[in-house]
Amino acid sequence: MARYRYPIPPSHEITPRDVYARRRRFMKQAAAVLGATALPGLFPASALAWRDQVSEAEPGRLGTDETLTDRETATSYNNFFEFGTGKEDPKRHAQQLRTDPWSVSIEGEVRRPGTYPLEDILKPHDLEERIYRLRCVEAWSMVIPWVGFPLRDLLRRFEPTSRARFVAFETLHDPEQMPGQRRDILDWPYREGLRLDEAMHPLTLLAVGMYGEVLPNQNGAPLRLVVPWKYGFKSIKSIVSIRLVEDRPVGSWEASQPREYGFYANVNPNVRHPRWHQATERRLGERGRRRTEMFNGYEAQVASLYTGMDLEKHF
Ligand SMILES: Nc1nc2c(c(=O)[nH]1)N[C@H]1C(S)=C(S)[C@@H](COP(=O)(O)O)O[C@H]1N2
Ligand SMILES: [Mo]
């Protein structure tokens, strides 16, 4: 647990991880030669189970060097309405969620649709660690070392057709395991969507871990989205379905309150939520408030996705 090392060590100290990564790549290639898989190319055999890879994830190239939110806070103050509406509810109630076995279906406008065990989906991906800000719509933010891989790497493997323009995601729907789904809080299952170019942006991550460990259930185990320039509700947890579609999907929050939650949900201090302003935020663990940055501080990387769009209208 406490073996995790922060801040990110200087490069001379990460040599063992480099050596490890090279060895892992070699083993993967060797395994690919030895064992032919049922779907050649789609799931090349890997040498290590993904759960064991999480603690060895290589530091990613993208991110921030800001002070991390402490792990205890990031795993105790959550939004996960399937387990209740209070911030402490997910930690208490999500432990009953069974995350293994887990399957994900990849459907719609792709050339290789199907439902696959999570371990097969993860096999070809080298996990990276990236330190990202996540800012929730209720105006708190945190800085988390996520472990995952770019969503676009996965989408490319399943070969979107030329008709694909958006990606729609769904969380597991299982009221037996998710007590919040027995109540009328949202239109279940939780749904979210991205435009295809947003989904293909290198900052958009599929996360399977944080702080060098497999994701705790309350943070969206075993597979969640992290879209760091958008409000937290876009970062859908416990994903079971990824569907490439032609028409713009409507997320659960947008469906319930279209005036309050737009499709884009880009962090924007200049556009207020009908019930509160969004110009400042509380960084968990800090006193006082800070000014919220445009696109959550990722303006240089993502502003070009929205050139020419009226961001007050497309909020
Ligand atoms: N399935 C599902 N995903 C979800 C939510 C949820 O209620 N259900 N809440 C969202 C909201 S509003 C936020 S702010 C983030 C919170 O992520 P965290 O608890 O890991 O900080 O998860 C998002 N993903
Ligand atoms: Mo949120």
Image (cartoon, rainbow, N blue to C red):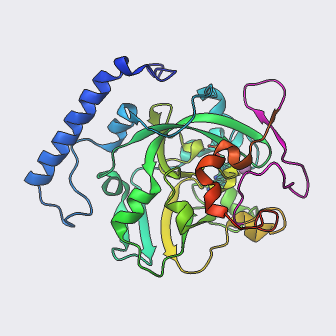
- Nearer-the-camera pick, 96 or 18: 18
Q: Is residue 20 above or below residue 140?
A: above
In the image, is residue 302 part of the stretch drawn in magenta?
no
Query: Can residue 314 be seen here?
Result: yes
Residue at image coords 20%, 52%: 45
Residue at image coords 54%, 38%: 63
Magenta stretch: helix, strand or loop mostly = loop
In the image, is residue 284 part of the stretch drawn in magenta?
yes
Is the C terminus in the top left, top right, bottom left or bottom right quadrant?
A: bottom right
Residue at image coords 47%, 24%: 8
Query: Can residue 172 be seen here?
Result: no
* Snapshot quadrant of residue 162: bottom left
288 relative position to 81: left or right: right
* Snapshot quadrant of residue 58: top left
Q: x, y percentage for residue 105?
A: 42, 67
View extreme (left): residue: 34
278 relative position to 300: left or right: right
Q: Which residues are magenta?
A: 263-289
Q: Is residue 214 above or below residue 285?
A: below
